[in-house]
Image: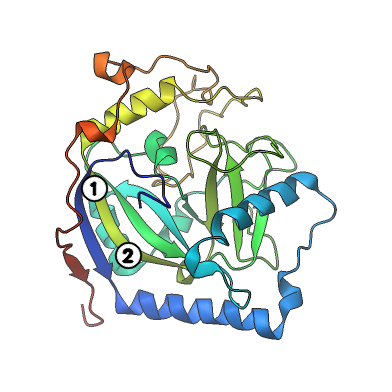
Amino acid sequence: MRKYLEGSSFQVETITAVYNPTLVSSFIAKKNVIDQRIVTSPEMFHKKWSTDARRDWIADIFNKRFMTMPWNQTKTTKPYIPVIHTTLQTTAHIICQNGFATLSQLDDGWYGKGMYFTGSMMYTLLYFQPVNGAVIIGWLAPGHMYPVYEDPNSKPESLLGTPLHTGYDSHYVVTRFDGFPAPMQPDADYRPGKGLYEEFVINQEHQIIPSFIVTFNQQCVRKLSQKYKSQRIPLTQTPTPIPPTLKLSHPSDPLLQLPSNKMALSSPRAPAEEEDEEANGDFDSEDYEQPSDSHSIPLLLYADDM
């Protein structure tokens, strides 16, 4: 988590490993189908959009991020990648027992109707549940990915509530910290704190397998959130006002609504609410004791007959 999910600053309180044999079997079967298509029908994975520099840029970021992971360095399979979904602890256990499918029914989704995930713990700070919050860490098989940059408030281009593009298994969005599409930055790398984040959208729960439920020290999360919001990278585009009834569909339970006067993080370095002296200083995870890697991790088993 610390290396690939930008979670080094978070103080972990509990980690529970999850094994649900039904979900594991479904995930493996889906990934095998995707990998078989590469061998038998490689043309299916060629890009199908016309000349579009911004979409090409997003696809390039995807490849640099995930095709360089040690387990993905093969030309005969599509990548599988670690992702995060934030939720309540009680909901996390329901998802790990029954799967993610019900999430797609809760919200139309900014970038297509489906289940939402991210690859950055820092990005979840805006959506992390302040009480009894948790994250599910899982493995995602994005398959044939479609790069998305359509603003959810721009008609008719918006993908709000629309199905995933025909012929693709997922949508991939490079975002700003506020969740809106990031402007094209040809020379930019996807790196923590550099203003680029990401969201994945899938519509088949067989593409995701939950592996861990993680909880964090709430004081640590609060202080990280305060510091990060106050020191975020200035935006290069004017944010679009979010309609008062538009539900968030980012990598948290899509049940939250923004107040009617809420703008999308439009003031660079705006002071965070209730900041204290420590939040204004250099906050680091070393201020808290990190659990030893030698500690055993409990296993939560969801047997077929449960």
Residue 283 circle label: none
Residue 153's x, y, as percent? 65, 35
Residue 110's x, y, as percent? 57, 44
In the drawing, does residue 40 fall left or right of residue 66?
A: right
The image quadrant that residue 15 belongs to is bottom left
The image quadrant that residue 276 belongs to is top left
Q: Name the residue at 39% across, 81% down.
A: 25
Residue type indicated by callout 1: Thr
The image quadrant where one finds the C terminus is: bottom left
In the drawing, does residue 243 fall left or right of residue 9?
A: right
Q: Is residue 123 visible?
A: yes
Q: Mark 1 sits on what residue?
A: 215
25 or 204, nearer to the observer: 25
117 or 196, nearer to the observer: 196
| Colour mapping used in the image | rainbow
Callout 1 environment at 10 Å: few (<14), some (14 to 19), or many (20+)? many
Question: What is the secondary structure assignment of the residue under circle 1?
Answer: strand
Question: What is the secondary structure assignment of the residue under circle 2?
Answer: strand
Residue 109's x, y, as percent? 54, 48
Please say if 47 is above or below 190: below
Q: Is residue 80 visible?
A: no
Residue type indicated by callout 2: Ser
Please say if 206 is above or below 156: below
Q: Mark 2 sits on what residue?
A: 211
Callout 2 environment at 10 Å: few (<14), some (14 to 19), or many (20+)? many
In the drawing, does residue 139 fall left or right of residue 74?
A: left
Cα gap from disc 1 to disc 2, whole angstroms? 14 Å
Q: Are the residues at dot 1 and dot 2 in contact (C-beta closer than 8 Å)?
A: no
